[in-house]
Amino acid sequence: MDIITTATRAWHVIQKEKAKTMKKISFLLCFMVLSIANLFSQEKKMVLGEVTFANFKNVYVKLENNSHVSSGDTLLILVKTDWKKALVVITVSSKSILTTNFSQEKVIIGTKVGYYPKDVKEKPAIKVPEKIISKDLVEEEKPKVAILPIAQSYNGRITVSTNGSMEKSENNYNRIRTSMNFDVKNINGGKFSFENYINYNRRFGVADSLQNFKEDFKVYSLSTTYEHTNKTSFSFGRKMNFRIANMGAIDGLQVEHRYKSIFMGGFGGSRPDVLNYGLNLSLMQFGAYLANEKEKGKGMLQTSLAFAEQQYHGKTDRRFVYFQHSNSVLGNFSLFYSIELDLYQNIDSVKSNRINLTSTYLSLRYKPTKKLSLSSSYDNRRNVIYYETYRSYLEQILNQETRQGIRLQMNYNPSKYVSFNLSGFYRYQESKPQPTKNYVANVFFSQIPGVKSSLNLNFNNMKTYYFSGNIIGARVNKDLFKGKVYTEFSYRKVDYDFFNAEQPNLKQDVLGVSLNIYGKKRSSIMLNYEGTFEPNSSYNRYYITLSQRFKSKN
């Protein structure tokens, strides 16, 4: 009996220990499941949106949720298949976010935007010990509104680049270019801000007698702004006003005041020199403008009307009215329109007060579905003067012949990996015997299976009164080491026939290789090679660029 009793007791003990062990295992399993679930619940999800309005300076963004966005934050844009940092938040409202583009990526209406929300931790509640206070001593305390100090913010980039040729006959092509772009908002938390964009080119292979500092040194922007109040500001220096952007940079004083959605402003000073873009006090100008900006739905309405007078050596040279309107509130339809009306002209000492339409630009965009977008434009603006350009001889021809005229364009994305682009251009001039026609087709594959690269195939057909021909090209891009290295290989075959017997035909095979390396602390280096091979000659050129970006943390 003792043996049976002892065995029975031992069995009960084993069963109890087994039950305790199972409870511990169950508890550990539950804890692990809850921990994993908590980790997944804390995983950040990107908040998405898109650009509703954009010009050369400001970009308006509409997001699904902007409660975690504040001034100084950086937003991402979708470039092909990669999200890249591009937009810095200036102000946040309940309907949209005003940003500025600090990248070299092109941002248009409809560009996808996103950000990862910051972790928001609730502050622990502070327990206040109860205290008996006489009702007679109780007084209503007025809530104190905390005035947050204005924080200084800055954003800039310094770039040093060199381009040259391996051919002795192209020594004059060798040069070094240095540029600095630096913007500071609210210096030392005050009301002053500063912005500048300065370039300097040093050419080699050119005689010292031909070197000209005014030709090599360019100041595109250099100004300081004083915000008297949150509605009134004064700017002095060289600055472009995006409300009257078609006028270009203004050297002098600019004043602006805002009343609700209406902006009133005036300016006085001079225009940059036409030949070297330097300061020229003989080209005085002054004027005023009235603008209205209003957010409506998911879009933006902007209208500007300006009056200006431009002088030459103190005498009126031109007097005109400038009108600009953009609209992105009509659902899938958006437009931009600008005109210039001359009220007074003095050309070759011939004065005229006749109203004359001297500049027109119209752009329409319609997106019936997510996969299809249609756009058209009409450009009859004055010719653009390029004080600096990296365009080749071929690219300059294309740009010159296809800027002014009518353009139709279609973009179709059957899937997220494939997109098609077709465009046609037409320009007719009474002084030319034949119109200019240009047809372009592009096929883009954002993800090639197996190699994780993108491929772009393009075809360009051009016909003018003095030449005609085709360009066939291909471009392959690939990111390496998690986006730290970007590579590109390109090829173009050019076949242009000139109708003038004195102008030789243009037959070229152009090879290009690029390597971009992105380092820590926003530094990067770009290495580029381009080889142009013609029947009787060849050109081998290289480009090297060092870039350092910097921005404040706030």
Image (tube, rainbow, N blue to C red):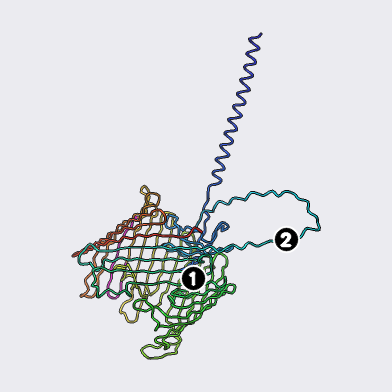
| Among the two numbered marks 2 and 1 on one chain, the one whose residue lies closer to the N terminus | 2
State which region is magenta: 461-476
Residue 465 among those drawn in magenta: yes
Q: Which residue lies furthest to the left in this view?
A: 536
Residue flagged by tag 2: what amino acid is it? Glu
Within 10 Å of the Cα at label 1, are there few (<14), some (14-19), or many (20+) other Cα atoms? some
As measured in the structure, the alpha-carbon distance from the residue carrying label 2 to the one carrying label 1 is: 53 Å
Q: Is residue 34 left or right of residue 344?
A: right
Q: What element carries label 1?
A: strand
In the rendered view, tell whether residue 551 sits above or below residue 482: below
The residue wearing badge 2 is 141
Q: Which residue does the numbered mark 1 point to in the structure image?
A: 335
| Label pair 2/1, CB-CB below 8 angstroms | no
Along the viewing direction, whichever of 234 and 85 lies nearer the viewer: 234
Quarter of the image that includes the N terminus: top right
Q: Which of marks 2 and 1 is in front?
A: 2
Question: Is 126 on the left-hand or right-hand side of 505?
Answer: right
